[in-house]
Amino acid sequence: MKFSSRQVEDIIIIPQYDWWSPTGPQGSLHKFNKVRANFIRKNLMNDAMPIETQEEYFSKFRVLDIGCGAGILSESLGRLGMGSVTGIDPTDKCVELAQAHLKLDADLAKKVTYKNTTVEALIDEKFNTNNNQSPHKDELYDLVCCSEVIEHVNDQQEFLRKCAKLVKPETGYFFLSTIAKTPESYFLTILMAEYVLRLVPKGTHEWNQYINVEDIEGALSSQAFRTVAKAGAMVTNPLTMEMDEFPNWLRGNYMILSKRLI
Ligand SMILES: C[S@@+](CC[C@H](N)C(=O)[O-])C[C@H]1O[C@@H](n2cnc3c(N)ncnc32)[C@H](O)[C@@H]1O
């Protein structure tokens, strides 16, 4: 299968571990997951100020989770009440893990699905490249998520452009989380997380692949997106490794929600 990532070979190592153990090698992803799910929930609600309840509003959402891994975020989005969630990932072992975990919750399995595919293949499927026809907007997504993925991708601008294409025009949202390219992020996410505390396997991250929020915003605004909210995320308790949102510090892990205007 063709896709454009640095070190997918390395990433393939990760599924050998238990992604779903909150204290396992993906433990920090689980801690972060609570923060990002809450960030998505409250900012979608704040932005739209829907007159219906959260449950009614989210039940109309068609969600795509790009690079879903073992489905940690996809499952949370399903539990938030999203109408449907499709998780895609080019690593087949991740998709196998996601599917296996989903079987533990029969109700959730009715609205979450996983596919071992790439953004490129999904775009080919949706956009008829031969006659350049755009799909009907109902075939696109109300919310496209791309969490902890872009730092593994080589051509990040092109990747963002493709992700943006899958967001429903005028009303759709794009959520992204990644790591800023700063000295602080090197210290926190490589030196401390990989080498000192060994929270994630060594070599998980490559500092050169990190990208600052201004670059994400620049790429998205050229695709007619407006930033709805952005915030950093940091460990607040070194004993439990619990994380929280830091609205004014986007120099380490951070999250951004944008809306497609046209
Ligand atoms: C750190 S994991 C994040 C998993 C999930 N998004 C989460 O946060 O729980 C990175 C994931 O990105 C996927 N990935 C790597 N390159 C990708 C690409 N070009 N397109 C889509 N997914 C990719 C990997 O297979 C892996 O599952």
Image (cartoon, rainbow, N blue to C red):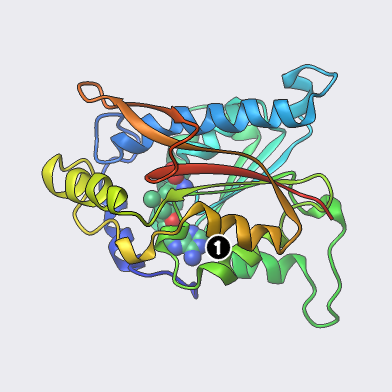
Give the percent coordinates (x, y) of residue 50.
Answer: 82, 24
Q: Is residue 260 left or right of residue 254?
A: right
Q: Which residue is mark 1?
A: 117
Q: Residue furthest left?
A: 196
Give the amino acid type for the residue marked by disc 1 in the picture: Thr
Give the percent coordinates (x, y) of residue 144.
Answer: 65, 48
Q: To which quarter of the image does residue 137 belong?
A: bottom right
User: Would residue 19 be seen by someone viewing this image from the given angle?
Assistant: yes
Residue at point 48% right, 35% down? Answer: 248
The C terminus, quarter of image: bottom right
Instruction: Tell me the element at label 1.
Output: loop
181 or 174: nearer the viewer: 181
User: Would residue 69 be seen by someone viewing this image from the given angle?
Assistant: no
Give the percent coordinates (x, y) of residue 92.
Answer: 43, 59
Q: Is residue 170 left or right of residue 219?
A: right
- 55 relative to 156, above or below: above
Q: Is residue 47 left or right of residue 249?
A: right
Residue at point 57% right, 44% down? Answer: 256
Residue at point 79% right, 24% down? Answer: 49
- 117 relative to 147, above or below: below
Which quadrant of the render holds ligand 1?
bottom left
Give the percent coordinates (x, y) of residue 165.
Answer: 72, 62
Residue at point 28% right, 63% down? Answer: 10
Q: Report crowding for label 1: few under 14, some 14 to 19, many 20 or more residues within 10 A (C-alpha).
A: many
142 or 233: nearer the viewer: 233
**Across the whole image, how many numbered discs are drawn on residues?**
1
